[in-house]
Amino acid sequence: MALPKFNDVPKYDVEIPSTKQKIRYRPFLVKEQKILLMALETKDQKSILAAITDTLESCIEDNIMIRQLTSFDVEYLFTQIRSKSVGEKTTIGFYCTECEEQTDVEIDLSTINIDVPDINKTIELNEQYKLDMKYPTYFGLLEDEINSESNIEQIYRMLILCLDKLKTDDEIIDFADESKEDIMNFIEQLTTGQFDKIMDFVNKIPALQHDVEFECTGCGHKNTSTLQGISDFF
């Protein structure tokens, strides 16, 4: 006799931060949680990111292009799915800046939001050239293994992922069609002023973050800490 299939899994609505598209999802099940925990045990960033995107593909009911989701879309969606799967509240340990005693703080994941500002993504480099920027996709970060590099390399890799198109009155150059070597040569010929304009966009990429205020259970010191990035909420 075959084992029965049971549990009517509930469905929830959520909005993709970058596009405002509403989608439906279900909580992850034991089979997905197992994959996530196994990836977490490896402590390998690429394995963890792959497990997270696989979970999104399994749990999101609507037909969307997972590969086109931005880094902060994936962070937010995964956090929302996790909150409905294992509980909206999670306990995270924070260390006091005075005595280094750890204090456990309960965080309500359902209250965490991402603010995506309405900004102009076109940068004027000079009278001839304009640069269209884009938010990096999660798969772009995954494939480039940004987290395994030095800080300087991370900055340049992130910058490259944000470059969309270079425009003149007569021509449009798509950076996706160019080699990384040619893109690096393009970046290195920029003036510091032009480079700073691009970095201003990169530095303002939305991210999953949450400010936490807590009183140390050891010495009573009042602390402020910021959770940022999916690893802090995992």
Image (cartoon, rainbow, N blue to C red):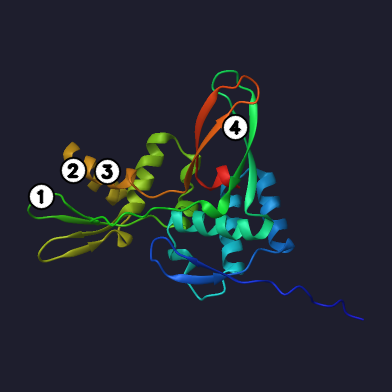
At x 62%, y 54%, the residue is 88
Front position among marks 3 and 2: 3
Q: Mark 3 or 1 closer to N-term?
A: 1
Residue matched to label 3: 200
At x 87%, y 76%, the residue is 3
Residue matched to label 2: 194
The residues bearing labels 1 and 2 have C-alpha atoms spaced at a distance of 9 Å
Q: Mark 4 or 2 closer to N-term?
A: 4
Residue matched to label 4: 94
The residues bearing labels 3 and 4 have C-alpha atoms spaced at a distance of 30 Å
Residue 49, visible in the rendered structure: no
Label 2: which secondary element? helix
Check disc 1 and give the amino acid type: Asn
The residues bearing labels 3 and 1 have C-alpha atoms spaced at a distance of 17 Å
Front position among marks 3 and 4: 4
- Label 3–label 2 contact, CB within 8 A: no
- Residue 119 horizontal side relative to residue 34, left or right: left
User: Of 130 and 73, which appears nearest the observer?
Assistant: 73
- Label 4–label 2 contact, CB within 8 A: no
- Residue 154 horizontal side relative to residue 181, left or right: right
- Residue 140 horizontal side relative to residue 25, left or right: left
Label 3: which secondary element? helix
Front position among marks 4 and 2: 4
Q: Tell me residue 39's x, y (percent).
A: 66, 50
The residues bearing labels 3 and 2 have C-alpha atoms spaced at a distance of 10 Å
Check disc 2 and give the amino acid type: Gln
Residue matched to label 1: 126
Q: Mark 1 or 4 closer to N-term?
A: 4
- Label 3–label 1 contact, CB within 8 A: no
Label 1: which secondary element? loop
Check disc 3 and give the amino acid type: Asp
At x 42%, y 60%, the residue is 17
